[in-house]
Amino acid sequence: MTRVIFVMAEQTTLTGNPAGKTKTKAHELATKQRDISVSEFFEKNRHLLGFDNKRKALMTTIKEAVDNALDACEEARVMPELIVEVIEMGNDRFRVIVEDNGPGIVKKQIPNIFAKLLYGSKFHTLCQSRGQQGIGISASVLYSQLTTGRSAKVISRISRKHHAYYYELGIDTIKNKPLIKKEKEIEWDKDQGTRIQLDIEASYLGGSQSIDEYLKETAIANPHATIIYTNPKAEQIIFPRVVDQIPKEPKEIKPHPYGVELGMMMRMLQATEAKTLQVFLTKEFTRVGSGTAKLICENAALLPSTRPRTMKREMTEQLMKGIKETKLIAPPMECISPIGADSLEKGMRKEINAEFYATVTRSPTVYRGNPFVIEAGIAYGGDQPGDHAVRMLRFANRVPLLYQQGACAITKSTIATGWRSYGLSQSRNALPVGPATIIVHIASVWVPFTSESKESIAHYPEIMKEIRLALQDVGRKLSSYVHKKKRILAESKKRGHIETFMPIIADSLKDLLGLKDDDKDKIEEYLSVILEHTRGNLEDTTFDPSKNLDYDKELASIGRNGEDEKSGHDDPKGDDGKKEKEQEETGAGGEQ
Amino acid sequence: MVKDVIKQILGIAQDIYGKILQKKQPEVETPLRALSNVKYDEKKGYFELNGKMKKRTLTASSVKSFAQTLKMLDLSKNIVDTNDIATKREAYYVSKNWGPARFNEQPESDAVMDDIEAMLMVNREQMGFIPEEKGGDIAGKLIVIDKDSDTGKEIKIDCTKMGTGAYSIPISVEHLKFQTNAQFILAIETAGMFQRLVKHKYWKKANCILISLGGVPTRACRRFIRRLSDDKKLPVYVFTDGDPYGFGSIYRTLKVGSGNAAHINEYFCVPQAKFIGITPQDIIDYKLPTHPLKEVDFKKIKDLIKNDPFVQTHKPWQKALKQLYKMKVRAEQQALAKHGLNFVISDYLPNKIKDHKTWLP
């Protein structure tokens, strides 16, 4: 389940020189040099894995557990039902409980999955999943152990026919091995699923980077999931399912040659069972047949019969060059499972009460051999404030990105899109201003993050371009809505203007022709008929907040209290005076 | 005549009412009163409407004017019915009672009034509306025969006996009769020049009637000159400054009328008028002191040459305007004082009137 690709241990291993008679400084140092276990490394570098501070630790712990739970449910084709509970225990300690209805874990694997770092990675295959977020749930277990000394309590059951098992687990940080403190069969009211309980040192705050907001956004990007959340204030919030379909199962694919870097290639060459380079290429990669493999070898000036294990750095570099010079078909796209434009809109409707929604799912594209899909959505108007920068919601493989908005390719691309022509105001190098929420989702087998903390997307030109195209697509839809609304507003204003004069017309005709009051009323009535007749029916675009049946007010207010803006995107310089001047209606002499 | 106005107004109202009862878009059409919608026939001698109409109906841009037109027709009918009058200013104030159809400024109400005038082809006096403006002072060899408004008895006003003052042309001039043995009528742009000529009794010397226009002549002033000239077969000479305003606005309007009032120009113009004011050539010949033309002056000249049917018909005017444009200067009537305060009386006017070649048509 924790699909971690992580080799830090390997790279940080320092080995001392064993022998030597004369004691040099190097020898002296060598006595201090030894293996550093991953666990120890983590102890000292917890910020790399998202445990920088107490607040973030809570977030990361929940994030890892929720991501794992959703991944597991989807893999097993189960409609996810998650229970998330955070209990404040005083002294900055919190108990986090995450329970799912997924496939469960076989007894033997439970300790390894939860209490061994770097366990369970599928190395040579790529598949779209949430589990790129860090080192996985075991890191949370370790954090729990470090900060509270408590063990993780896990229950898992794989079916009705099997028992549920209960474990209390810790981690041996020196050996990176699970410490099983308690292990027993128990009664559990769930047929299948997994439940983990962790006690951690943390702090709970509201606002735009809170776990409340995180779960809310998770619900938007995962409209097929139900999440029942109890926050530290003991308030229960239910994020209901709005789509009754599990997302298309993403297929695992082998890596595409263009997407593999030198270090990874070297490891793959060592790990392969293939006897020749040609077989290695066809077996370990997608889109490489034997002909293409030969061509790569030719371009690399390597013999197809070279034994992969014998290939050193220079030869691998040659191979990389050969790959670069060979034209390859783009990788297959069935490995990507986007949210889907319809589902995304449903997810938005539930959280944002807007007048207008537009969503788009782009066709899959490739960056560096990795397939990816961009989806974008915009919710406009309604009860959203119009004098702020738009609200940005960023997702990577359905996981909300709450930190480092400014550094993210999604934000950059949104800024680079010209929103003025789509009906929002925007000043240079700033997010557009207006009553709107913009959502961008990148789904990929490998989402390129800018840093270990995995909170913003790297600026690959292919990705930036796709984001921009997706935003332009929803932007165009927005623009036609905004303009239509403006037109209707102007028209109804004109009608109102015309109607003001109807009683005056009726009155002067009555006076001129000596008509009765009844006739006067008739004139007014007929004039209205004539007006309707000549100008057509007027579409009603006034915003009716009760029209959106999916909208959940309580849900929308989550994470809104105590807004602590992380990035100063509220640009007050937004050019507000752009409002189009209403056509002036002068009286006398105003002929057409 | 008055009955006709009422009949016409009722006809229009009935027409609109009928349209509404048929659930058809009601509308009023009025002739477009603008220079772009006039033609000039030299033989007829005045600007005539060209037939373009503007429509007022239930559209956002015209509904207010539509309602105002109806209101104004109603007001006119009431005034005529009760044998009363209202000044243009009063009509404007009456509109303040019309709710959203009220006029914000008097020019708006004047415009609607003029539209009705053009629509009914009657002048506003017949609809009971009278202008505030007064224009035109008279001095010289003329006896005006007016009526006492109480007794209806004839009153003779001798314009030679006004001392250093003058007789004012009344707002309505149709009932006036004239006695004169003068040789010509001299219409003068500025009150200052008029005063000089009155002071030195130029009218006695030249045996003429002096009329001060005071800028662009009012309808009453134009009508007065026209009636006097027609009645007594007197030539009309016009003496203005040598600038685009004197040529294009004062003289042109006096002679052929204006675009704005094209519907009534037939009666409110003086086609027999001749220009003896300061021409561009005079500026050179008399070595007159000048002022530089301003941007608006250049614009006015270009506009006259390009858009004014009167200027387009008369080559000499085009030539004169082009000459002025090149000279880049203008000269006032009073500039003649350079050659002595009474140079205008002793030299300029006698020479001008004698020499037809120095005139402009």
Image: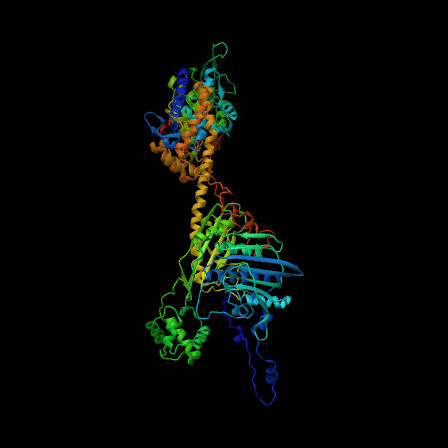
What residue do we see at 41% from left, 15% from top?
B3
Percent across and percent down for residue B222 are 42, 23
Percent across and percent down for residue B23 are 38, 27
Q: Is residue A538 above or below residue A296?
A: above
Quadrant into which the C terminus of chain B falls: top left
Is residue A383 toward the left or the right of residue B59 in the image? Answer: right
Q: Is residue B169 above or below residue A294?
A: above
Residue extending farthest right: A91
Is residue B5 toward the left or the right of residue A241 in the image? Answer: left
Query: Depth check: B326 or A269 in front?
Result: A269
Q: Can residue A529 be seen in this view?
A: yes
Query: Depth check: A277 or A21 in front?
Result: A277
Percent across and percent down for residue A152 are 59, 66
Q: Is residue B259 above or below residue A150?
A: above
Query: Depth check: A69 or B189 in front?
Result: A69
Q: In this view, does B38 lie above or below A45?
A: above
Residue B57 image-quadrant placement: top left
